[in-house]
Amino acid sequence: MIPNDYHFVWFGPSFPFVNALAIRSLATTTRPRVINLHLSHELEGQRHYDALLRDVGNVTVRRIDFDALLAGMDGVDRTGLRTAYTALASENRFAATICSGIAKVRLGR
């Protein structure tokens, strides 16, 4: 059986309304078991983020530990990956939405 779990990855220090709307829509239409929200920055205190966590009960927040991710990678250009991560984190981007192991990549604003 395929789990009804979803993952959103967000790079950036702000959390726009459209992000909260996407997650709320998913929660309403698919009734997932859990929605994992992976973040590059701490977002507490932002209106749309705080309201989302308050209103949608099955959102689990996970902070991206980029150093831990890099530590487990051998034979890759860590400097290049850190540069790409830093660029994504400064530009406010959804990197991916993953549903039950099926990735839907979206690198847009």
Image (cartoon, grey):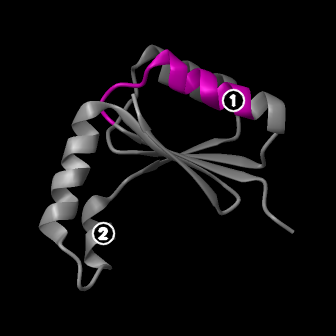
Residue 20 lies in the magenta-colored region: yes
**In the rendered view, would you say 107 is above or below 24?**
below
Q: Nearer the viewer, residue 72 or 54?
A: 72
- Label 2 or label 1, whichever comes before in sequence order: 1
Residue at 79% across / 28% down in the picture?
28
Image coordinates of residue 91 in percent, x first then y, are: 26, 32
Image-based side of 105 in relation to 98, left or right: left
Residues under numbered marks 2 and 1 in contact, where contact means CB atoms less than 8 Å apart: no
Image coordinates of residue 60 in percent, x first then y, are: 59, 45
Image coordinates of residue 74 in percent, x first then y, are: 26, 85
Asked whether the viewer can see residue 50, the reply is no
Q: Nearer the viewer, residue 51 or 10?
A: 10
Q: What's the residue type where badge 2 is placed?
A: Ala
Image coordinates of residue 18 in percent, x first then y, are: 53, 20
Q: Nearer the viewer, residue 97 or 71?
A: 97
What label sits on residue 37 in the rendered view? none
What label sits on residue 56 in the rendered view? 1
Residue at 33% across / 68% down in the picture?
69
Q: What's the residue type where badge 1 is placed?
A: Val
Q: Read off the residue under disc 2.
A: 68
* Residue 107 falls in image quadrant: top left
Q: Which residues are magenta?
A: 12-26
The residue lying furthest to the bottom in this view is 75
SS of the residue under disc 2:
helix
